[in-house]
Amino acid sequence: MARAGIYKSEVVRARNNLLAMGRYPSIDAIRGELGNTGSKGTIHRYLKEIEEEEGGNTGTQVAVSDAIQDLSARLAERLHLEADQRMAALTDKHKAEISALNDTIIALRNEVDSFRSQSERQVLELSAEKTTHSETLSTLQEERIVRAQMTQRIEDMEGQLAKEEMHRISLEEKHQHAREALEHFRTAAKEQREQDQRQFEQQIQFLQGELRGAKETVNAKQQELIRSHEDNARLSSEQAHLRSELHRLETEIRPLRTAREQLAVFELKNQQLEERLAQSTTRLDQLKADNQSCTEKLQDTHQAGLRLEAELTAAKAVLASQEQILQRITTSQPPATKGSGQRKGSAENQESLFEPKK
């Protein structure tokens, strides 16, 4: 909290400190050096007394009216006040610009982080799509191998079925030939018996002499008939065997039909996998395009950040130059111990510093 009053010694000490630092000992500067304590009127009065004392000691004091001295003091104070106000306004303006630039840079950095996060997510999605694509290709390859194996197995079984069918046809032809031979033999035996009967009736006397030979012939024919019956039984057995083979082949054909149905299911599944593969390829291309777009946005954002950093650097440079101008203003002020002519020259120098350069 500011004190109620100040002493002249404190004003002298604050003025000497400012002069030692190369600053002009204005009323506001001395008040700030004293910790914003004391009234400006008191400080002005003490400064006037100090200037009069220094002027009397050196013998260079010039007699001027109190009105002119007061006018020059107020003019100097007004100039310093305006300079401080203008400097404060410029400082506030540049601080606002720097704050706005910092906010813009933070927003751009956040946007860059967002784009970077989005790019990383898209890279992960792209990697997942590539993995799914690889798995789909592997599954498709396995399905193609299984399909080829099933096709080969079906072709082998169809070839075996054709061979069995040819064997069955051959056995049926053999059986037909055996039946025809048996029928022919029966017809021939019947005709032979009828002929023998007629000959027996006609030549009963002649046959009695040759009864033994005829019996032998009959026995031989009976043996042939027995052999024919045996052949007939053998052919019947072969026919039963062929029927069992046919039944076995029909049993083996059933898995082939099931295999054909499975092959149709595999073909449908293969078609679905190819459609998924096409969709994965389309999604992969889309992700690549999105990644390229994000990369371009990231580059544009980075360039905008660089431009803003350059503008911030330029603003800082302007602020530094204005601070140097303010430093020159404060250092170019002459000490307040001179006469009114020197006060007037100092005021003119201060006014020339704030005039716009032509």
Image (cartoon, grey):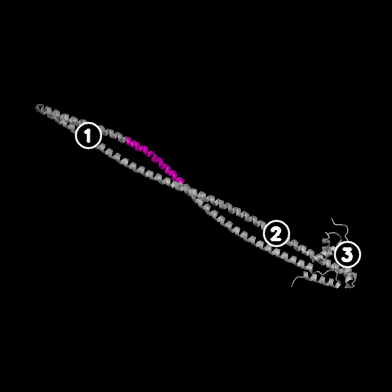
| Left or right position of 138 against 125 | left
Q: Amino acid at mark 2?
A: Ala
> For this rendering, which residue is in front, 338 or 235?
338
Tell me which label, 2 or 3, sits earlier in the chain. 3
Q: Are marks 3 and 1 in contact (CB under 8 Å)?
A: no
Rendered image quadrant of residue 77:
bottom right
| Left or right position of 299 against 358 | left
> Disc 3 versus disc 1: distance between alpha carbons?
162 Å
> For this rendering, which residue is in front, 204 or 130?
130
Which region is colored magenta?
244-269
| Left or right position of 252 against 51 | left
Name the element at disc 2.
helix
Q: Are marks 2 and 3 in contact (CB under 8 Å)?
A: no
Disc 3 crowd, CA 10 A, few/some/many (<14, 14-19, 20+):
some
Percent of width and height locating residue 335? 83, 69
Percent of width and height locating residue 264? 43, 44
* Residue 246 visible, this orientation: yes
Q: Is residue 355 magenta?
A: no
Q: Amino acid at mark 3?
A: Tyr
Tell me which label, 1 or 2, sits earlier in the chain. 2
| Left or right position of 104 against 238 | right
Residue underneath mark 2:
100
Percent of width and height locating residue 230? 23, 31
Disc 1 crowd, CA 10 A, few/some/many (<14, 14-19, 20+):
some
Rendered image quadrant of residue 42:
bottom right
Name the element at disc 3.
helix
Tell me which label, 3 or 1, sits earlier in the chain. 3
Looking at the rendering, in which quadrant would you find the N terminus? bottom right
Residue underneath mark 3:
46
